[in-house]
């Protein structure tokens, strides 16, 4: 069931979203060769404690029954698509790191993701990051009252593929609100004429995951980290948004 939010609820969602954006800005500024992904997680932990927010990724149940997720952020490096576990791995020049972060604040969840280059990266990798973020923004532009959700999905896919990249199909965006994952699922691919009609008060998290090579992915033995099947780089950008009569409102704008 798709839960419609009123104006006051969306304002609270924006408070959560703006805090997530604040933390991602701090993490982005800290990314450099030599820093560990565990240290980036510590930045999120310190800020979350100061704010009195509840991290929503930490201890999230494993869908396959394995150990709960141990980090506050998902820290996915290079060929890691999503759900990378923060560790003592040191970032090196030429890496990219996707950071996904979410909290519960004011009774609502904010959720957003960015992919950050570590120092200088290959031109093709720069293009991957640029295209993935553009795909997200172009998808958001289609999140208008009266459009079908498929317009968002197909716009993302079209932009990624016309630039020579592939869109991950095994993982998708989602509705968001009092819970991190609500209806409807938000694919990054598909038919523009499919899916529910977008209505005022719907809130969704749009999150294209775009690969240099194949769209195929698999989950590593740690039961969380998703990687590309061919080992090529992947990028991930996400915003939580509200559908309004004045157009889409980004709740996690950095």
Image: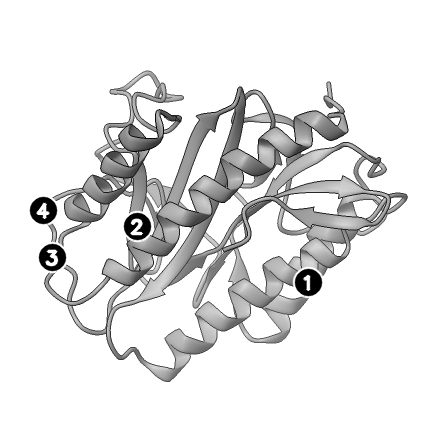
Q: CA distance from mark 3 to mark 1?
A: 33 Å
Q: Disc 3, disc 4: CB below 8 Å?
A: yes
Q: In the figure, is residue 25 to the left or right of 247?
A: left
Q: Earlier in the sequence, mark 3 or mark 1?
A: 3
Q: In the figure, is residue 237 to the left or right of 13?
A: left
Residue 175 x %, y % = 63, 31
Residue 98 x %, y % = 35, 54
Q: CA distance from mark 1 to mark 2?
A: 24 Å
Tell which tag, 1 or 2, sits nearer the viewer: 1
Which numbered marker is on residue 90? Answer: 3
Q: CA distance from mark 4 to mark 2?
A: 13 Å
Element on which disc 2 rests: strand
Q: Disc 1, disc 2: CB below 8 Å?
A: no
Q: Earlier in the sequence, mark 1 or mark 2?
A: 2
Q: Quadrant of residue 35?
A: bottom left
Q: Residue at x 72, y 21 (%)?
A: 3
Q: Quadrant of residue 101?
A: top left
User: Mark 2 highlights which residue?
Assistant: 76
Q: Residue at x 63, y 44 (%)?
A: 187
Which numbered marker is on residue 88? Answer: 4
Which numbered marker is on residue 73? Answer: none
User: Mark 1 highlights which residue?
Assistant: 138
Compared to residue 174, the image places residue 127 above or below, namely below
Q: Residue at x 53, y 19 (%)?
A: 107
Residue 117 x %, y % = 32, 68
Q: Nearer the viewer, residue 63 or 137?
A: 137
Q: Nearer the viewer, residue 238 or 21?
A: 21
Element on which disc 1 rests: helix
Q: Disc 4, disc 1: CB below 8 Å?
A: no
Q: Earlier in the sequence, mark 2 or mark 3?
A: 2
């Amino acid at each position: 069931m798709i839960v419609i939010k009123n104006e006051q609820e969306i304002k609270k969602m924006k408070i959560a979203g703006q805090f997530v954006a604040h933390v991602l800005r701090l993490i982005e500024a800290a990314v450099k060769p030599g820093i560990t992904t565990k240290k980036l997680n510590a930045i999120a932990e310190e800020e979350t404690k100061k704010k009195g927010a509840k991290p929503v990724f930490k201890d999230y149940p494993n869908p396959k029954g394995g150990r709960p997720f141990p980090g506050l952020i998902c820290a996915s490096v290079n060929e890691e698509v999503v759900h990378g576990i923060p560790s003592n791995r040191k970032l090196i020049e030429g890496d990219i790191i996707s950071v996904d972060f979410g909290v519960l604040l004011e009774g609502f969840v904010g959720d957003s993701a960015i992919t950050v280059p570590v120092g200088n990266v290959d031109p093709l990798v720069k293009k991957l990051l640029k295209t993935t973020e553009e795909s997200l923004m172009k998808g958001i532009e289609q999140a208008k009252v009266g459009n079908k959700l498929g317009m968002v999905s197909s716009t993302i896919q079209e932009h990624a593929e016309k630039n020579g990249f592939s869109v991950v199909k095994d993982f998708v965006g989602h509705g968001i609100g009092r819970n991190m994952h609500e209806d409807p699922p938000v694919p990054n691919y598909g038919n523009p004429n499919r899916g529910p009609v977008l209505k005022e008060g719907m809130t969704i998290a749009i999150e294209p995951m775009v690969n240099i090579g194949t769209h195929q992915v698999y989950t590593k033995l740690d039961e969380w980290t998703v990687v590309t099947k061919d080992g090529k780089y992947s990028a991930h950008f996400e915003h939580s948004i509200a559908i309004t009569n004045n157009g889409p409102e980004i709740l996690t704008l950095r």
